[in-house]
Image (spheres, rainbow, N blue to C red):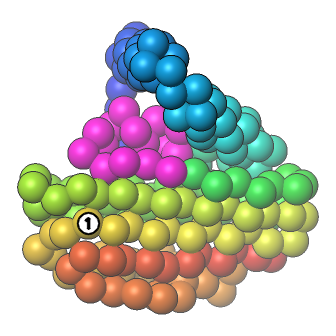
Amino acid sequence: MTKLSIREILRAANHDFINQLQLIKMNLDLDRIDDAKKIIENYCNQYKSFSNLNKLNWPKTVEWIQTFPYRFPSIEFLLKSNVTMTPKVKKDEETVEYLEKTIQRVYPHLDPYTEQQLLMEVEANEEIVKITFDLHGKWDVEPFHSEILDNHVGMSVEKESFDHWKYVLTIKE
């Protein structure tokens, strides 16, 4: 896994924050109040999702997701998180391994002239964890498939092409 130092992560986070503030200021200067409000709302929703993700209590998976935008800057990252309870099942390392191998497979093959976007949806309760990986863009490599899955981890592919790759990891006891 590509590791960033705390200094590098904070530097990138501060840079993103300043960019968002400048965008808000620009919209206010142009009397585009609704646009400024929309930026604030989107920013708040993204950070609420990051905060909710901590309930998962899978430190490696949470770190992987929260540092994704800084480790893979060519992909716009969106997160939706609905973790209602900490799950009993513990498949933290296996989950990170699968997610990392997925991205490492496609990242070097992204088309630099195409917008790339990853929507990750994390849903969890005491019994089950579902992670939806939904990547849109353009690349020239076949999707990654792994043998790490066991009878506690299922993977269903919903879409698999060179411009849309969607699968759901389902982890349960």
Q: Nearer the viewer, residue 139 or 89?
A: 139
Q: Is residue 98 magenta?
A: no
Badge 1 is on which residue?
Answer: 137
Q: Quadrant of residue 153?
A: bottom right
Q: Is residue 168 above or below residue 81?
A: below
Task: Indicate left or right for 24 with 116 as reference.
Answer: right
Sort mark 1 into few (<14), some (14-19) or many (20+) by Cα contacts within 10 Å: some
Question: What amino acid is at disc 1?
Answer: Gly
74 to the left or right of 64: left
The residue closer to the viewer here, 68 or 93, is 68
Which residue does the image show at 49% across and 44% down from the upper left?
64
- Image quarter where the C terminus lies is bottom right
Label tally: 1
Q: Position of residue 49 (x, y in %)?
A: 69, 44
- The quarter of the displayed image where residue 34 is located: top right
Dot 1 falls on a residue whose secondary structure is loop
- Any part of residue 88 in sight: no
The x, y position of residue 147, in whole percent, is 42, 81
Question: Bounds of the magenta span?
Answer: 64-78
Q: Does residue 76 lie above or below 28 as drawn?
A: below
Q: Quadrant of the N terminus?
A: top left
Q: Residue at x 32, y 77 (%)?
A: 164
- State which quadrant residue 19 falls in: top left
Percent x, y for residue 115?
A: 24, 56
- Residue at left offset 56%, top offset 78%: 168
Q: Is residue 169 left or right of residue 129?
A: left
- 60 to 142, vertically: above or below: above
Vertical arrangement, residue 112 with respect to residue 142, above or below: above
Q: Position of residue 119 (x, y in %)?
A: 49, 60
Q: Residue at x 48, y 88 (%)?
A: 158
| Name of the residue lying farthest toward the front | 31
